[in-house]
Image (cartoon, helix red, strand yellow):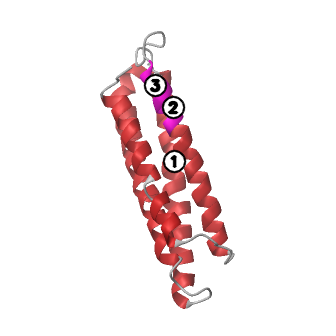
Amino acid sequence: MSLVAFYPWIKALHVISMIAWMAGMFYLPRLFVYHTQLATGSVESERFKVMERRLLKQIINPAMISTWFFGLLLLSTPGVIDWKHDGWWHVKLTMVLLMTGFHGAMSKWRREFLEDRNRRSHKFYRIANEVPTVLMVIIVIMVIVKPF
């Protein structure tokens, strides 16, 4: 049996994974905004460290991995993309790579908070909070509208 028979299921699992990934990507920078406003070593700061670790390790990381896994399965499904004429997937892939890179940056920032080494302001994280939204909008437009 080929992947074509499972295409609707793979697509559904890809979308579910992506929703979970984006939920975490929207929430973690918001936690960083609040964390910057807490005293280092305080009970509240330590609580945020736990929340950030759990969000990243238990939700965001597995969701990113499953998003990539099901996305690659979709790309492997015959007939899904006209590789010669569809240009939208280049833009989508670039945005997904940028999202993955941003995910990596947030992992680094979480480690800095964990080690009480954060030097960025709440304003930085407020701006960073917008990055996943912009990337997600472009990704969705590429997949649904397919302008190229």
- Within 10 Å of the Cα at label 3, are there few (<14), some (14-19), or many (20+) other Cα atoms? some
Q: Name the residue under label 3.
A: 89
| Residue nearer the viewer, 90 or 71 | 90
Q: Name the residue under label 2.
A: 93
Q: Mark 1 points at which residue?
A: 64
Rendered location of residue 58, percent (x, y)? 52, 61
Where's the N terminus, which quadrant?
top left
SS category of the residue bearing label 3: helix
Does the stretch in magenta take in 88? yes
| Residue nearer the viewer, 2 or 82 | 82
SS category of the residue bearing label 1: helix
| Residue nearer the viewer, 26 or 8 | 26
The residue segment tinted magenta is 87-95
Q: Which of marks 1 and 3 is in front?
A: 3
Specify which label sits upstream in the sequence, 1 or 3.
Answer: 1
Q: Are marks 3 and 2 in contact (CB under 8 Å)?
A: yes
Rendered location of residue 83, percent (x, y)? 48, 13
Q: Residue 51 carries which label?
A: none
Does the stretch in magenta take in 109? no
